[in-house]
Amino acid sequence: MRVRGRRRKSVAFFIALGACLVALAVALNVGWVLLNWREVALLVLGIVFFVLIITGVVLNTIFLIREIRRNEQHDAFINAVTHELKTPIASIRLYLETLKTRPVDERQRLEFYNVMLADSDRLLHTVEQVLQAGRAAAYRRQRPVTTLIDIDELVRESVELTRVRYNLGPDALHYVDGLHGERVTVAGDADEIRAVVSNLLDNAVKYSDKEVDVSITVTAPDQKNVVVRIGDKGIGIPAGQLKRIFHRFHRAPGRFMARVKGTGLGLFIVQSIVKKHGGRVFAESEGPGLGSTFTIQLPRA
């Protein structure tokens, strides 16, 4: 908190400094114009230099503020990744020490194994996200592995996997088949598209607050595109964050958001993969507490 407070003071300082420099430059330029208004050549030259100085000051201030905010995001990312790595490792170590130091019955042993496997999956998921984020910069320059993917089948598999992973009941995830039996395919990398859908499903479950109620719809609005919508009735997203949440390391503010741990990379990876496949992804929400909907649009094969 102290570091964040110091950085906010730094941002305020650079904003105030930039405003003061602009005001000073304006005052000097106005005074100079009043003194030399008869010299047309000097007047034009002075105005040109004035515009260049003001532009330089404004750009320099914007650059400094962006660098401060970027450093703050990087620190938040490092803290989040550290937590995501240490927590499952500490849990696995604790259960292994328990198994080593005292006898447990078979039921407890199986329970410990299940917990350790879940922690291992969480650890692997974090590592994969970091690796995918590192490759995301090259996603747009690379062509995906071109295979035909049955989008209906892929989404159904992802829904069932999410149901099992979070031990959800039949009423938690609602799959709506908007294709009416039509087989719709997309060309791309099946693992990457599956990662996109799974990532959005994971977010919908994690940010559902009290009760999980997620709807998944697959439609083909025309002959060129297929659309996957994942909507929840969770904590919602403020209007000013709907585009920023796809930025690398960015996490929307809020008390509930702070309780749900994450790296701030998931939606950045989602957007990178979707763009790589020639599609687009966007978020919609009526505001905090009113749920959110993420829409993936991909070109049909």
Image (tube, rainbow, N blue to C red):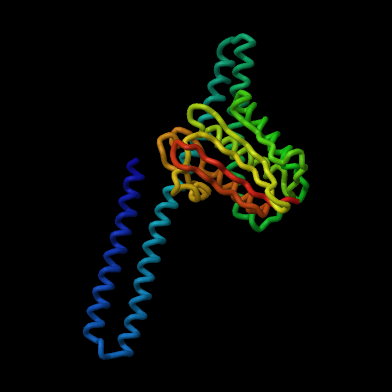
Q: Is residue 57 visible?
A: yes
Q: Position of residue 233 (x, y in %)?
A: 51, 34
- Looking at this view, is 170 or 190 the one in front? 170
Q: Residue at x 61, y 40 (%)?
A: 128
- Looking at this view, is 218 or 120 the one in front? 218
- Looking at this view, is 259 or 160 the one in front? 160
Q: Position of residue 143 (x, y in %)?
A: 71, 55
Could you tell me which quadrant the N terminus lies in?
top left
Q: Residue at x 31, y 63 (%)?
A: 18
- The part of the image, by quadrant, that contains residue 218 is top right
Relative side of 48 to 39, left or right: right
Q: Position of residue 182 (x, y in %)?
A: 77, 42
Q: Position of residue 34 (x, y in %)?
A: 22, 83
Q: Residue at x 25, y 78 (%)?
A: 30
Is 148 placed above or below 55 here? above
Q: Residue at x 53, y 33 (%)?
A: 206
Number of callouts: 0
Is 61 placed above or below 120 here? below
Is 142 placed above or below 46 here? above
Q: Is residue 127 visible?
A: no
